[in-house]
Image (cartoon, rainbow, N blue to C red):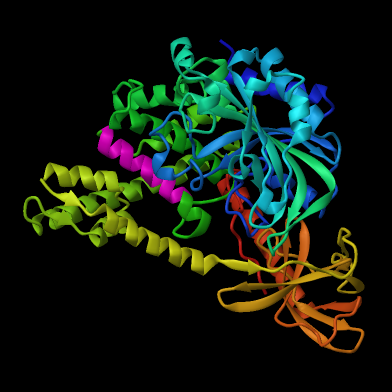
Amino acid sequence: MRKSSEIRQAFLDFFASKGHAIVPSAPIVVKNDPTLLFTNAGMNQFKDYFLGNQVPSHSRIADTQKCLRVSGKHNDLEEVGVDTYHHTMFEMLGNWSFGDYFKGEAIEWSWELLTKVYGIDPAKLYVTVFEGDASENLPASSVALMHWKKWVAEDKIIYGNKKDNFWEMGDTGPCGPCSEIHVDMRSEEEMAKIPGRDLVNKDHPQVIEIWNNVFIQYNRKKDGSLEPLPNKHVDTGMGFERLVRVIQNKKSNYDTDVFTGTIEVVEKITNKKYDYSDTKEAVAFRVIADHIRAIAFTIADGQLPANTGAGYVIRRILRRAVRYYYSYLDYKHPLLHQLMPQLAKQFENVFPELTGQLDFVTKVVKEEEEGFLRTLEKGLKRMDDIIAAHPKQATIEGKLVFELFDTFGFPVDLTKLIASENELQVDEAGFEKEMLQQKNRSRAATAIDTGDWVQINPDTETKFTGYTATAANATVIKYRKVKAKGKEAYQWVLSETPFYAESGGQVGDTGSFQFEDGSSIEVTDTKKENNLFIHFTDSLPASISTKVKVQVNTNHRKNITVHHSATHLLHAALRNILGKHVAQKGSLVNA
């Protein structure tokens, strides 16, 4: 049986032979992109190339990318481990063309790799193409259809609607039609009863998508309209865990060697046996095997568990794993940190960052486990109080169920289990109402309304001169209005800038813009968004001229600079005294 490490390497070797540069995975923790908490797709690190903000060093690239998804289509956290093929963290194998090859080569190579290199039976493969959308005046993908007909019979080609076969990066930005490849993993008897084409994109656990060829050729504007991009790109993704399952001929991703090593360690620790079933005990094994990867690699990439933002996502994943081994494997001590050596060894050649920080990550995870195990015991005591306050056959109110979830980390299924043992019901609808209210509050608190760019001059990469200068005569490239938490601001992009953008813990420069009519506005902050230097102001000038004089607040810059140096000196001293494992992350360097 081919090992997962060999399957991954075969993908990279194949595209290297097709002229692709092989690049490492970007960190799973996203920096300099306010639209994302985590890398959730292989294309995230190449977003700048699609947006035209940066020129790639190679027009053809291939990689395996660590991704994390805990919400959205098919990726609800509470479902992971219950089925056989969805995950929190997963690897996305991808090949990319930035204005180079397009549909013909992408389709031919994907078919060649799957059927010739990996030896997947073509009879079990189906492909989808975009059927078009009259409401947006989008034509059917006739070019993709023409190329697919060279390799597969027409009865293997399925037309998909906009939901399934038109990919968009977000509400705005690059997008385009896509062509998926699905594989039928059912038995011969099942395939004889129902054709595989009838189960494509129907959430069948054995008829699954393994590859998506996205052809990026449009830009979605703020008003919802589409405009053709000057360059056409290829953005493809293949779920590594699913691919390994297909090649190793397993019924579940968790039965492959991507996960079996971790499951075996859990068996030894808990003295229980994984039985491949749908019992809570078996689900607990799968939850742990999945979640430990997300926890370990995210911490190794710089995101510590916390009460807000990305840190809360990691804490929630970790606590879900703790709840499962505590409740369903009857293990009352920290377990997850014991899995770190096996995980680091498994991925040392592809994601070595965990091996390099093994002691640190292990310590963080153990401390989180110990803290939550204490909280869990308190939650069980709170549950006892709630049970005592309700007569037999009564219903526990949604607000109390939500309190157990939100304050003590109890999942609804754990609350339901304890309630049923005490002849009580649970108001799930009331709980969902409380959850929705919390989600709406969170969305409202973080929502950013971003307007379209107003283009003043053609796009060009901003030249940064801040290491040697604090002033410059620049050209205005574009600006836009943004609104967050009820406050309006404006963002500016210039041809050159001496303003240092927030990075590495150092806050962005402040200063001023002076326009040709003599009007001046204050620059309140400078950030990088997808490698684009963004200057923030609270207002617009009386008239926007093409030329602008920019000036950094030098006193503010000087105070930041000395504190940045002090931070590095402190870090060097800590590493000298305590050891090389000390890592500088999460610093705030301001004036």
Nearer-the-camera pick, 121 or 567: 121
Residue 122 appears in the rendering: yes
Query: Residue at the location (48% across, 30% down)?
Result: 85
Looking at the image, is 306 positioned above or below residue 522? above
- The image position of residue 352, as x and y in percent, is 63, 33
- The image position of residue 15, as x and y in percent, is 77, 25
Look at the image and say whether residue 502 sits in the magenta stretch. Answer: no
Apparent side of residue 217 relative to residue 365 in the rendered image (left or right): right
**Within the image, what quadrant is residue 225 found in?**
bottom right
**Within the image, what quadrant is residue 12 found in?**
top right
Look at the image and say whether residue 315 sits in the magenta stretch. Answer: yes
Q: Main secondary structure of the magenta part?
A: helix
Nearer-the-camera pick, 413 or 358: 413
Magenta range? 314-329
Number of numbered discs on residues: 0
Considering the image in quadrants, where does the C terminus appear?
A: bottom right
Looking at the image, is 247 positioned above or below residue 496? above
Query: Residue at the location (68% across, 18% down)?
Result: 153
